[in-house]
Image (cartoon, rainbow, N blue to C red):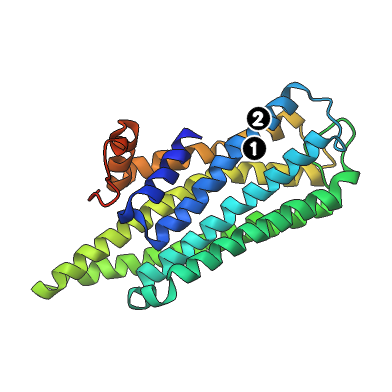
Amino acid sequence: MCGNLLVIISITYFKQLHTPTNYLILSLAVADLLVGVLVLPFSMILTVCSCWHPEDLLCKVRGTFDVFLSVSSILNLCCISVDRYYAVCQPLRYRAKINANVIVIMILVTWTVSALIGIGTTIRGLNQGQPNRCLCFSQTSTILTGSIFAFYLPAIGMFTIYLKILLVAQRQARSIQSTICQSIKSGETVSKIERKATKTLAIVMGIFLICWTPFFICLTFYLLSNYNIPVPVVVMFKWLGWSNSMLNPFVYAFFYTWFRSSFRMIISGKIFQGDFTHSKLF
């Protein structure tokens, strides 16, 4: 919660961080923060008190927010991958295609679709839950369909986009190296910045997949095998998935100079000593 709160404060406070990509990172940080505030406390209670029925209010609330915020994280990462695609593969059209209005629409669609999926899945499947279990709160077909559209397809789409970005970035790097003209220097600098940002966001996506893929694969086999996989194994992979919400701020702090600078200013309390909204962070 503290790490994601630092990301949220940094982007909202410092004017230099008011960019389309950072607005999407802000949306992702809000989803990760809400996981720590709304999902994990309920999950800890349900882990200790394992006798909760799927019909109980706490189980319904936890299930709704769990699906809602997990899908929101996935869709935010999809939006980030689209943003990076235009920034690297179509830089001349980037500002025309990815502007403030487009970013707002992407964020609104992401959160609206996530909320509808979370509420719809809970309403549709709660009555078919397993007795004395608040783990799988929906019927098998609902969970499998939700996993395909909420994780597998977006993951394949993001992998394809980042693979395309990687190929284009490598081609740009070779082109820059073979060019001697001094006029290319500024373009080279911009290209390096964009490639570094893309590499960092690809690492964020990679960490996301490492955290969540074991759970969705385990959940799929758990359902197809008629619940033969031990429940503690599924729960363990679920907590691994939730830990992704903690890791993203560390990635930003490690790779992004401007986030490191903003974090230091916030933690030291410097922003309370004057107006630093227009400070140069890099």
Q: Residues within 10 Å of mark 2 (few under 14, many from 20)?
A: few
Q: Is residue 173 left or right of residue 75?
A: left
What kind of residue is marked 2? Pro
Extreme front residue here? Answer: 274
In depth, the one of 136 and 83 nearer the eye is 83
Q: In which quarter of the image is residue 237?
A: top right
Q: Nearer the viewer, residue 254 or 38?
A: 38
121 to the left or right of 15 = right
Q: In which quarter of the image is residue 243?
A: top right
Label 1 sits on a secondary structure element that is helix
Q: Do the residues labelled 2 and 1 touch (CB within 8 Å)?
A: yes
Name the secondary structure under disc 2.
helix
Please state if 273 lies on the left or on the right of 108 as rendered. Answer: left
Disc assigned to residue 267: none
Residue under the point 42% across and 49% down: 203
- The correct choice, above or below, for 192 with respect to 57 in the image is below
Q: Where is residue 167 in the image (x, y as percent from the top left)?
A: 37, 67
Residue 31 is situated, as x and y percent measured from the top left of the image, at 56, 47
Residue 230 drawn above or below residue 81: above
Determine the residue positioned at 67% across, 46% down: 216
For residue 41, which numbered disc appears in the image?
A: 2
Q: Residue at x 85, y 41 (%)?
A: 226
Residue 16: image x %, image y %?
30, 55
- The residue at the far top in this view is 48
